Image (spheres, rainbow, N blue to C red):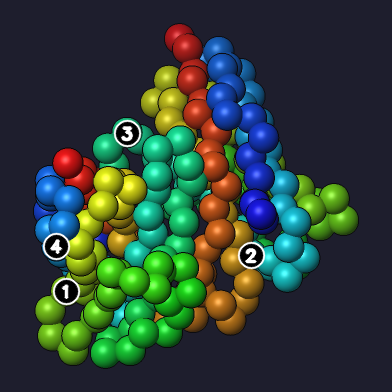
Amino acid sequence: NAGVMQNPRHLVRRRGQEARLRCSPMKGHSHVYWYRQLPEEGLKFMVYLQKENIIDESGMPKERFSAEFPKEGPSILRIQQVVRGDSAAYFCASSPPMVAEQYFGPGTRLTVT
Amino acid sequence: DQQVKQNSPSLSVQEGRISILNCDYTNSMFDYFLWYKKYPAEGPTFLISISSIKDKNEDGRFTVFLNKSAKHLSLHIVPSQPGDSAVYFCAASVTGYSTLTFGKGTMLLVSP
């Protein structure tokens, strides 16, 4: 039973490029969450999605960041025109409905040069 | 403004002894609390949780205690093992709102 999958594990982008991070939730989980961890910090909530719906995006920057969870395929976190401050570890988590425990993927480490 | 605080960045314990990791919260709406363990270059792994209707939950070597009046919870690991060395995150949520609010973590080092 595969856990939460994220790819790529490492991503290097130059300033101004786009970054696309993918997340496949655990089987049977319909809720997906994205968190960001900056160095020496805890995880900060970014966005919560269900299939084809954004439920809560209160933690996501208003510009350059977007997320989707289509009917088919993985959830995508997209960062346009990346800047050095976007360098961080981005974690995806999933859960079944009405369950508080979230299960995390291994993360994507984004480095912006 | 940090709503979940882990005031000890690190903790060192000898193998076989008890490890106690602490967590404080400020938002009285939080009613469900979780502990996660994280190794370097991996995602957090769920350890144990507790609802605000309880004051203790136990799972093997791990016990979480909740003191609602003090807005404080702690994770006890007994006995500690070298493999427990990791960063431990406390997280909180509000029932009906699925997002988690995390503390900054405590790095636990268990020495043989």
Circles 4 and 2 on the same chain: no
What is the CA distance from the residue labelled 1 to the residue labelled 3? Answer: 25 Å
Q: Earlier in the sequence, mark 4 or mark 1?
A: 4
| Mark 3: few/some/many CA within 10 Å (<14, 14-19, 20+) | few
Q: Is residue B58 above or below residue A55?
A: above
| Residue linked to disc 2 | B32
Under mark 4, the amino acid is: Glu
Q: Is residue B19 left or right of residue A89?
A: right
Distance between mark 3 and mark 2 Cα atoms? 26 Å
Q: Identify which residue is drawn at 34% across, 71% down.
A: A63
Find the distance from the CA under tag 4 to the CA under tag 3: 26 Å
- Tell me the chain of label 3: B
Along the line of sight, the residue nearer the viewer: A61 or A40: A61
| Subunit under mark 4 | A
Q: Name the image quarter holding residue A75.
A: bottom left
Q: Are marks 3 and 2 in contact (CB under 8 Å)?
A: no
Image quadrant for the N terminus of chain A? bottom left
Q: Secondary structure at mark 1?
A: loop
Chain letter of the residue carrying label 2? B
Identified by mark 2, the residue type is Tyr
Crowd class of label 1 (few under 14; some 14 to 19; many from 20; radius 10 Å): some
Dot 1 corresponds to which residue?
A: A74
Report if the CB atoms under discs 4 and 3 are less than 8 Å apart. no
Q: CA distance from mark 4 to mark 1?
A: 18 Å
> How far from the left and from the top, in percent, is residue B77?
58, 33
In x, y percent, where is residue A17? 12, 58
Q: What residue is pinned by disc 3? A: B40
Residue highlighted by disc 4: A18
Check disc 1 and give the amino acid type.
Pro
- Whether residue A21 is visible to the viewer of this picture, yes or no, is no
